[in-house]
Image (tube, rainbow, N blue to C red):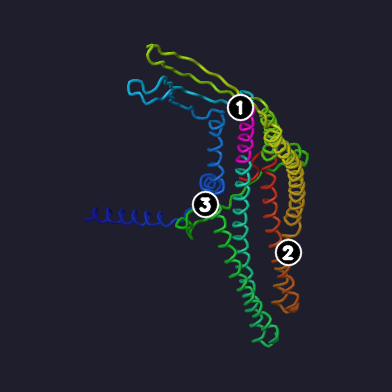
Amino acid sequence: MKKYIIILVALGAAGIMSVAAQEVAPVLSLKEAVETAMRLNPELQRMEAQMEGKNVEWKTALGLPNPELSFTREGISNNPAQPYTEQKISLQQQVDFPLTTFYRLKRIYSEKEAMAREVEALKKQVTVEVKTRYTEVIYLEYIRKLRADTYQLSKELADAVKLRVESGVGTYIDQLSSEIRLVQSENEQYETERLYHEARYKLFNYIGLKPDQQRYDIRFADTLRTHNELIEQEVALYTLESQPMYLSASALLKSADFGIKEAKSGYLPNLRLAYFQQDFLGDGFIFRGIEGGISIPVWGMFNTNGEIRKAQSLKKQYDWDLKAVELGIKEKIELAWHSYDNSQVTMELYKTQLKEKSEMLLNLTREAYRLGQIDLLKLIEAQQLYLSGQERFFIALRDYYLRLIELEQFVNQELVY
């Protein structure tokens, strides 16, 4: 009997552990969020699909239209014995001038390189966006806790004021003020809760999670880490010309050069080759032959000149696009680096000077108010200094990580993981 009891207890414990394991909420880490976005982000998948088409575009640009098979009968008459005098079957193939095909393929390969760089840039941008949204979620989790602390402090304040009023020391005005602050802190809790869930769904939607996978119980790992070494501004600027969007714009400019050469090759003739068999009835012979021909570009002043002008115009556009991309990347690097530098200073100031002093001030003023040494206004002021200091620190911490995430795409190394 004792043995069966032990078995039942063991099975019950195993069942409880199994249920507990099932109830453990899933954790979405930063790395998993980025990896999921690489597989499911709609914009990235659309670009990948375009890239697949670009990879095989060269097959349609070889300048080889379908061959033409023709059958000819000549000398048709009303004589049943000899209804025609000659018949011929021929196979013809037209081809572009080889130089035209060469430049066309070079243009397509350059466009393919440009698109590949765009995909690379988009992957970096998706990584930045996922990490940014993930950081916002974690930041709002801290703000939720801060709002809970604010509510708790407001409740403790309201209770303390009520106790002083009941003992005849405090005033009813102080009690009304503390109760209003308590209601306001409760409203702030609800608003922060709304912002938190809004940030969660923005992250889920950007990653590409299906609606049925966007569960309420998904937790986020507060494990954002970074390297301790400082990022030098020159290091970020040094990588400007190796950025994917810069390389993409450069490749498009190169493709425009080949496009101009392709257009100019329109002055060259296209080629035509044919093989035929010809039968002269009555002689019993079958003649075989080949035929060659070239196109004469007599309308080049209209057709080819127009194509050249279009290609030259496109090159000018790509040239200015490259300059705009260069200036845009430089501006982003400068702003990201200065923001990173400022947020780092702000965060260090709070950690080394403000945090400990604001906590000490709050504790001293609460004790002084309890002993009747200061009025309610001084206590509220100390409480506001503490809470606003906490919030500014979280903001500085969030901005610090956001600036590092922005810099990540320019220094070609992972800074936040």
Give 162 or 2, whichever is nearer the viewer.
162
Q: Nearer the viewer, residue 178 or 28?
A: 28
112 magenta-colored: yes
For mark 3, give the secondary structure.
loop
Q: Spatial distance from mark 1 to mark 3, Cα to Cα?
A: 41 Å
* Mark 1 lies on residue: 101
Vertical side of 3 occupied by 248: above or below: above
Disc marking residue 217: none
Identify the disc placed on residue 208.
3
Q: In which quarter of the image is residue 187?
A: bottom right
Asked if the stretch drawn in magenta spans residue 134, the answer is no
The residue sitting at the left extreme is 1
**Whole-percent x, y for residue 307 in the image:** 68, 36
Q: In the displayed structure, would residue 253 be above or below residue 40?
A: above
Q: Earlier in the sequence, mark 1 or mark 2?
A: 1
Instruction: Quarter of the image for the N terminus: give it.
Output: bottom left
Q: Which of marks 2 and 3 is in front?
A: 3
What label does residue 358 carry, if any?
A: 2
Where's residue 246, x and y in %? 70, 39
* Predominant SS along the magenta part: helix
Callout count: 3
Q: Could you tell me which secondary element the residue under label 1 belongs to?
A: helix
Q: Give the range drawn in magenta.
A: 101-119
Name the residue located 67 percent from the left edge and 58 percent from the top edge.
394
